[in-house]
Image (cartoon, rainbow, N blue to C red):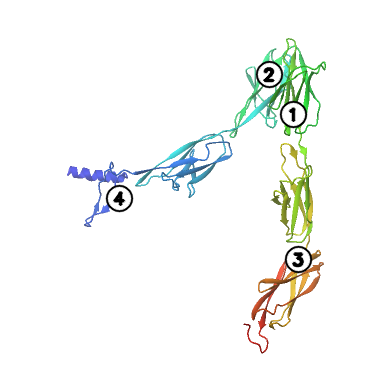
Amino acid sequence: MIGIALIVFGTLAVAMAGFGSTPVVGGDGGGTVFPFQDVEDDPLEEVRISLEANRTTLRPGESVRFRATYENGSPATGASLSVDGTEHSMDDRGRATVTFDSGGSYTATASQPSTETVRYVADGTIVTVERYEVALAVSANATDVTAGDDVELTVRRADNDEEVSGTVTVGGESYSTDDRGRVVVGVPRADTFEVTASREPTATQRYRSDSVTVTAAHRRVRLAVARNNSELRPGDTIELTLFRTDTGNIVEGNMTVGDRSIRTVGGSATVTLDRAGRYDLEATRSDTRSETFVPVEETLAVRRHAAPVSLSANRTDVEPGEAVRFAAERTDTGAPLTGQLTVSNRTIWLDQRGQATVRFSEPGEVPVVARRANTSTHRFPADRLNVTVRDTSYRVRNVDSPDAVERNESASIAANVANVGSDVGTARVDYRFDGEIVAADSLVLGPGQSETVRFDVPTDAALGTYRQAIEVRDDSVEVDVEIRSSSGAGEDE
């Protein structure tokens, strides 16, 4: 009895733990049978989930597209995606897109709950979000001072010259700047100090420290740079000359323009700047035993060449529903403009010939502007013209047509066409017979003016009833006409 009880208890325990089969009713109807199952011979089926990412290294604000599949390559539609504890649902293709707002390292895991027969093996990957690196620039109002002088230090972003708060380290002591990135530090002794600026990282940015050297010495001499051209354009070559401000003498030194370093020859150096922009210029000279030279730090502004845009149109006076073909070109070369039109609040791209066709629907004065984004060497002042869309609207009234007419007999249909708008316009009137336009006319109508138009009915059509229509741009009226057999004549063969 003890053995039997142990067998039953073991069977129940295995079934409750999920290792056994569901209880079934015995074939003789005598009750429930708990079948024994050999775990070693019949284990759960193991299905591995594979998680792929279109990239694993990115910047804050960018997205990663994940794709989860089963071993057979089919989408893991039952899986869910967890990114550092945050759940994201998969679509019916086993895909999910996740945007990462902050820098750091994230673990992405694709998993699926196991069933009674299948155990799903999760898969994961590491996504690294690299913060944007922003270089700091620290400057001093004076880099050569006398011991005891106060030095004003300023911390900026090197990319846009914006003043930012931070921490400045001078001689092992740290000082916090104000909100404008400024702090005044007293120089305690005659020495050479490496002033370093740093800033705590944010969720999206980390800051690269910058430093400037402040020297407390007996004497300092300022340097300056003269240039032969003050209005620079891309492609211009500029000559830079380094001199002392105390004597005016030209001296040798080193210059840095943008990312290029130059050694002067005879105190001068030449550089060609191919792109528009602002270039940092720094000029230095090695110190002597008795003198310290204050470096030159300036900005060279290279302005783009102007290439004004010229916009033309095949017409500038239209009615609602009519189209205008525009053409834009560069005035400096006459080449087609590869840009866009702004028509009221719409943006339309010009084709490779610099052309675009625009249909106008609302009455009024519509501004049309042609523009193009600046390049590294040129700017494109926009051109504008106005299109007048007349206030015209046409109505069809008093249609007069016979209800029936004998075949091949003369008959006509007439209608009154009125302009209910406030401007003069030309109304196109179409006569449609049995779905086809068989005749047309044009009427010049002033505001509130109307005129009668008449068309011949094609009575040579086969016998029957036909739908007629008098149509204008904004209106149409339909009437039927019956083509009957002539008296005493048989039906058409």
Q: What label does residue 393 carry, if any? A: 3
Quadrant in which the C terminus is drawn: bottom right
Whether tag 3 and tag 2 are in contact, CB under 8 A, the answer is no
The reply to whether residue 352 is in sight is yes
Quadrant in which the N terminus is drawn: top left
Quadrant housing residue 198 = top right
Q: Is residue 361 left or right of residue 70?
A: right
In this view, the mark in front (2 or 1): 1
Mark earlier in primary sequence (2, 4): 4
Q: Amino acid at mark 4?
A: Thr
**What is the CA distance from the residue labelled 3 to the residue labelled 4?**
79 Å
Q: Amino acid at mark 2?
A: Thr
Q: Amino acid at mark 1?
A: Thr
**What is the CA distance from the residue labelled 1 to the residue labelled 4?**
84 Å
Mark earlier in primary sequence (1, 4): 4
Above or below residue 394? Residue 132 is: above
In this figure, which residue is indicated by the disc labeled 4?
Answer: 22
Looking at the rendered structure, the secondary structure element under dot 3 is: loop
In this figure, which residue is indicated by the disc labeled 1?
Answer: 272
Q: Residue at x 79, y 69 (%)?
A: 443
Q: Nearer the viewer, residue 16 or 280?
A: 280
In this view, the mark in front (3 or 4): 3
The reply to whether residue 153 is in sight is no
In this view, the mark in front (2 or 4): 2
Mark earlier in primary sequence (2, 1): 2
Whether tag 1 and tag 3 are in contact, CB under 8 A, the answer is no
